[in-house]
Amino acid sequence: PGSRRFRTRRVMLPPTHVIFDLDGVLLDTEPLYTRATQAVVDEFGVIFDWKVKAGMIGRSDAEGARHLVESLGIALSPDEYLRRRGPILDRLFQSAPEMPGARALVAGLKGRRVPLGVATSSAHRQFRAKTAHHDWFGAFDAIVCGDDPRVAAPKPAPDIFLVTARELGAEPARCVVFEDSLSGVAAAQAAGMRVAALPDPAVDAGRFAHADWVFGGLADVSLEALGF
């Protein structure tokens, strides 16, 4: 990781609002998903690796499950995979850790009175489980989950970010989005927002070169660099 960062050269209005993805951005839940998925597919003698996982990050549960069973060629339906994975995740989510720098960045933005939102593909029940022991999530002014009926299509469609912007009373062009997935970056850009990408260390950061900024982690983020 380190402090790699760059931005495209575009002249835009100063940002006023910030929207965060959840998994892999605010909370370090991606390893938990990996553990739960490997536990499910163990009986088929296959390995759930980054080649498969990269195609799932940022997608809805249904789309991710479909990608998994097709990629690994296992004798499970997407629904059965999700049914088996559910109880394992529920246990793991009880101890989901925060990402380094997440709490400090949120506090810094709130100190500047910047309205904050969360736009996550997770269902609301999962969001509650992941954040139950993180009282700092009270700092967010809007939270929109993937099962919100107003979100007609999942990322990379822009729906979830546009709904979150409306909840915040924000112009999309004045929003900065933090995302760790290519589909999330595409969704935010389709919504007309600027994007700060946070690629997992296992992913080539060069694939995110179309984002406005690329950071090695939230601890590397400079609010001044973002325009605040």
Image (cartoon, rainbow, N blue to C red):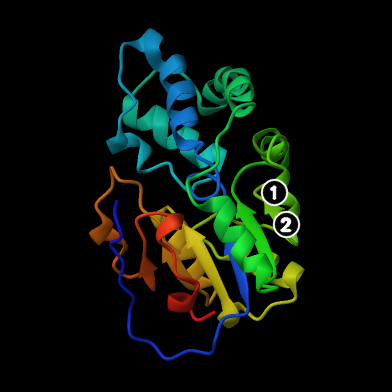
At x 65% / y 74%, what residue is drawn? 112
Estimate the x, y position of residue 17 in percent, counting from the top left.
Answer: 63, 74
At x 75% / y 67%, what residue is drawn? 167
Q: Is residue 100 above or below residue 140?
A: above
Estimate the x, y position of residue 104 in percent, counting from the top left.
Answer: 57, 55
Estimate the x, y position of residue 58 in percent, counting from the top left.
Answer: 48, 49
Is any atom of residue 114 visible in this view?
Answer: yes
At x 46% / y 19%, what residue is drawn? 76
- According to the image, label 1 marks what residue? 136
* Element marked by disc 2: helix
Question: Of 30 and 223, which appears nearest the observer?
Answer: 223
- According to the image, label 2 marks what residue? 139
Disc 1 and disc 2 in contact, CB within 8 angstroms = yes
- Give residue 46's mark: none
- Give the image quarter of residue 67: top left
Q: Is residue 34 above or below residue 203?
A: above
Quarter occupied by the C terminus: bottom right
Is any atom of residue 149 visible in this view?
Answer: no
